[in-house]
């Protein structure tokens, strides 16, 4: 079915057309501290856990407002119960003595005045008005609809990369599905289940994107949960069993499974027999199946959508699924651990624990490179300045779905501790890390399912914004883990075929360029989605210029 035909059928079946998105290439930088103001609270909340955590404040205020409203309503209901019992007592017995003028008068007064006051109670209006006014005051600080979409896409991303069971997620379990085998990938200390409406919204986001693979998996669970609670009503719910059946039926139709679309539409009509649109859909599905009956073969299998820009998807996801566990590395004699001073007086009395992870490309991990207090201070300096991370696309920079985080740039003038940090990096690497020979420290906080798909840190295009510093390409990366996570978030090196788990306070170092100045293609790497936890890193990118005598060039491409 072509795009035009699909849009025509969308109109015929009475459902909205999907929206599409486009991506971009990797690399780039944002604003530095002192250069621009941070973004508002309501923007891109989903893209950094620090922003998500900040959203707890408005919800606490909404809880306070709702508590006040309920107390007012409870008092009002108690008074209504008093009125109800008073009037009910007058109707007990075989006959109500209206011959008594006092009773007759109160009957007429009740029907002319009292009942009107009860039904149109000002107290009820005042209670709900106070709740609505309070909500409007905090509304500007609440996540936007785009944040709900971003959070839903994050759950789909985790579902894909870690092959998680949607049914398990709905029940608060992080379970990996491999064929018929289901294993616990992570066990939370406290289980948080999703409601039918929660799952419905995730499926609807996928549906609106034209992603029927994910729409079906989430709407199936939503339908199952709605069926189990049919007849119950939750004030906060937006969706219903009928809504979920409607979307799921059409998602199956779009995926090429007409028989399931027919089955679900018939179930919908059982609950809502007067819906003419769905009745027309059923006739259409029956006609399509009748026309198809002469053609043998099963209906189209529902496949996960392809990602054109991610050619290494299987390798990338396989490395992420190891969660950084590399048991065979300990069997390689050329990989070792040592105390590193790099012949620097600065490190003589306090050497750094060095772990060589890979030789080609050369990748090392420096354990306990920063202290807990230093990591906390760096996070604190960056927090007010975090903005949505961008990537380079030609000469421009833009936000993309394949990089979900916020970042800020810290100059070393912010605090003397950052100067000391630069000295330590220079001592370990032997490189010049002073501007313009190195970029300012970039601090990154990942969002819900935050990730950065496979990319190079060095520029791969002559028009890259990296060259605006007039100090050449990025020769090396020094990345510091400023926090720990409970699961996920590993750094995966695609062609080197291994991944590094998040090790709090440790620093990862690798060369991006060969000594010839050519980019090292084996440094293609990715930040795996954070499954559970709050991931912070700090990047120090060191450029070619200023390193001429510290890392001499070579004419040999293999160096």
Image (tube, rainbow, N blue to C red):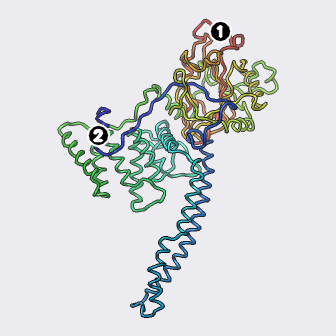
Q: Please state the horizontal and vertical placement of residue 431, each as a whole percent of the image.
A: 71, 18
**Rendered residue at 53%/33% (across/down):** 320
In the drawing, does residue 107 fall left or right of residue 429?
A: left
Residue 333 visible (yes or no) = no
Specify few, some or many for label 1: CA neighbours under 10 Å numbering under 14, 14-19, or 20 or more.
some
In the drawing, does residue 219 fall left or right of residue 339?
A: left
Residue 159 visible (yes or no) = yes
Residue 376, picture quadrant: top right
Up/down of 337 relative to 386, above or below = above
**Rendered residue at 37%/36% (across/down):** 303
Of 500 and 243, nearer the camera is 243
**Mark 1 residue element:** loop
| Label ID, residue 9 | 2
Residue 463, picture quadrant: top right
Q: Residue furthest bottom?
A: 99
Of 491 and 42, nearer the camera is 42
Q: Earlier in the sequence, mark 2 or mark 1?
A: 2
Of 332 and 117, nearer the camera is 117
Up/down of 90 relative to 396, above or below = below
Image quadrant containing the N terminus: top left
Specify few, some or many for label 2: CA neighbours under 10 Å numbering under 14, 14-19, or 20 or more.
some
Q: Which residue is mark 1?
A: 553
Mark 2 vs mark 1: give the one in front: 2
Q: Please state the horizontal and vertical placement of residue 119, each as a whole percent of the image.
A: 47, 72
Image quadrant containing the C terminus: top right
């Amino acid at each position: 079915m072509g795009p035009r035909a699909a849009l025509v059928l969308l109109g015929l079946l009475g459902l909205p057309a999907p929206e599409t998105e486009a991506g971009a290439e990797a690399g780039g930088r944002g604003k530095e501290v002192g250069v621009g103001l941070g973004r508002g609270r309501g923007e891109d909340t989903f893209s950094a856990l620090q922003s998500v955590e900040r959203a707890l404040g408005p919800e606490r205020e909404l809880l306070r407002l709702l508590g006040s409203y309920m107390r007012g309503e409870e008092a009002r209901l108690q008074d209504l119960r008093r009125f109800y019992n008073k009037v009910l007592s007058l109707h007990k017995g075989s006959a109500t003595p209206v011959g008594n003028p006092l009773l007759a008068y109160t009957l007429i007064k009740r029907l002319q005045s009292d009942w009107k006051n009860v039904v149109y109670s000002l107290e009820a209006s005042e209670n709900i008005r106070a709740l609505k006014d309070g909500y409007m005051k905090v509304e500007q600080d609440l996540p936007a609809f785009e944040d709900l979409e971003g959070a839903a896409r994050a759950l789909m991303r985790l579902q894909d990369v870690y092959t998680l069971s949607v049914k398990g997620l709905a029940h608060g379990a992080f379970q990996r599905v491999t064929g018929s085998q289901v294993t616990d990938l992570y066990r939370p200390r406290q289980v948080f289940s999703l409601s039918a409406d929660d799952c419905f919204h995730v499926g609807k986001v996928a549906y609106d994107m034209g992603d029927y693979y994910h729409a079906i998996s989430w709407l199936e669970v939503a339908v199952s949960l709605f069926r189990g609670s049919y007849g119950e009503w939750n004030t906060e719910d937006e969706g219903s069993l009928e809504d979920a059946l409607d979307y799921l039926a059409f998602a199956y139709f779009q995926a090429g499974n007409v028989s399931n679309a027919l089955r679900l539409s018939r179930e919908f009509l059982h609950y809502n027999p007067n819906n003419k649109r769905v009745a027309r859909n059923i006739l259409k599905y029956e006609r399509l199946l009748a026309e198809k009956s002469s053609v043998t073969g099963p209906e189209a299998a529902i496949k996960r959508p392809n990602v054109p820009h991610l050619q290494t998807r299987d390798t990338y996801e396989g490395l992420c699924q190891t969660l950084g566990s590399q048991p065979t590395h300990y069997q390689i004699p050329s990989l070792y651990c040592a105390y590193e001073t790099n012949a620097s007086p600065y490190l003589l009395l306090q050497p750094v624990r060095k772990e060589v992870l890979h030789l080609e490309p050369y990748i090392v991990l420096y354990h306990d490179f920063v202290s807990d207090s230093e990591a906390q201070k760096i996070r604190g300096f960056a927090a007010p300045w975090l903005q949505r991370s961008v990537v380079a696309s030609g000469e421009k920079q833009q936000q993309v779905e394949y990089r979900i985080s916020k970042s800020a740039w810290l100059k070393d003038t912010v605090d003397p501790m950052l100067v000391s940090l630069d000295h330590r990096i220079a001592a370990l690497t032997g490189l010049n890390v002073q501007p313009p020979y190195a970029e300012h420290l970039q601090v990154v906080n990942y969002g819900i399912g935050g990730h950065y798909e496979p990319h190079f840190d060095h520029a791969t295009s002559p028009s890259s914004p990296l060259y605006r510093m007039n100090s050449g390409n990025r020769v090396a990366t020094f990345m510091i883990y400023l926090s720990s996570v409970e699961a996920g978030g590993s750094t995966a090196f695609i062609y080197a075929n291994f991944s590094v788990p998040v090790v709090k306070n440790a620093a990862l170092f690798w060369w991006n360029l060969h000594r010839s100045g050519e980019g090292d293609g084996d440094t293609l790497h990715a930040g795996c989605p954070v499954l559970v936890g709050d991931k912070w890193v700090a990047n120090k990118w060191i450029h070619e210029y200023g390193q001429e005598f510290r890392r001499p060039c070579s004419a040999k491409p293999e160096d």
